[in-house]
Amino acid sequence: MDNEILFVELNINGELKYLHINKKWTLLHVLREVLNMTGTKYGCGTNDCGACRVLINGEAKNSCVIPAKNLEGKEIITIEGLQDNGSLNTIQKSFVDAGAIQCGFCTPGMIISTSALLKKNPRPSENEIREGLKDNLCRCTGYVKIVEAVKLSSVRLEGSIG
Ligand code: FES
Ligand code: FES
């Protein structure tokens, strides 16, 4: 039955959400249309652009192709969940300071991928940064400032500056 409604318990940004969802709904649909968490963007809807990325158990994943019903018991972190006591976190600030944002549509997904990358590899080389962000598309920038933003994040998170 395509319209079957399920009850699920999802852990989003450290809060348990109790939801009735259609079994076909993606996590992106639940975030944006049910929970009104619009920081996660709908770009392609086909797993090609990375605008919809979230962290699932620490891994950056495209939420537009993941059924929400499969995520019980997993830790989901969205761009909203990265804030630091109501302020931008270090990576978010670094994207602003490096001028890595133009229209901003790709930025939440870029920041999610950067978070996952720097957790695994706190001092990535330029090639490793480009590899880590290869599934995030930006239609505005030439990626140079985005790579700079990741480098700045890395340095700041290691406490070298600011
Ligand atoms: S909207 Fe999910 S990959 Fe493009
Ligand atoms: S800043 Fe516009 S798509 Fe990346």
Image (cartoon, rainbow, N blue to C red):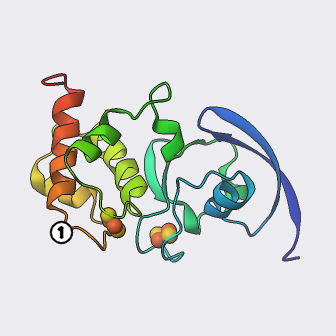
Residue at 24% over, 54% down: 100
Figure quadrant of residue 5? bottom right
Left of 14 or right of it: where is 83?
left
Residue at 55% over, 61% down: 63
Residue at 21% over, 52% down: 99
Figure quadrant of residue 93? top left
Task: Note whether ligand 2 is within 8 Å of mark 1.
Answer: no
Q: Is residue 27 above or below residue 45?
A: above
Q: Is residue 129 above or below residue 14?
A: below
Q: Position of residue 32 (x, y in %)?
A: 65, 58
In this view of the protein, which residue sits in the foreground, 112 or 33? 33
Residue at 84% over, 77% down: 2
Q: Residues within 10 Å of mark 1 (few under 14, many from 20)?
A: few
Q: Is residue 91 above or below residue 101?
A: above
Quadrant location, the N terminus: bottom right
Q: Visible in this render: residue 90?
A: yes
Q: Position of residue 41 (x, y in %)?
A: 51, 62
**Residue type, label 1:** Gly
Question: For the image shown, how many numbered marks are present on the structure?
Answer: 1
| SS class, disc 1 | loop
In this view of the protein, which residue sits in the foreground, 18 or 104? 104
Q: Visible in this render: residue 56?
A: no
Quadrant location, the C terminus: top left
Q: Is residue 29 above or below residue 153?
A: below
Ligand 2 appears in which quadrant?
bottom left
Figure quadrant of residue 65? bottom right
Residue carrying label 1: 142
Left of 107 or right of it: where is 143?
left
Left of 92 or right of it: where is 22?
right
Q: Position of residue 34 (x, y in %)?
A: 74, 56
Left of 105 or right of it: where is 124?
left
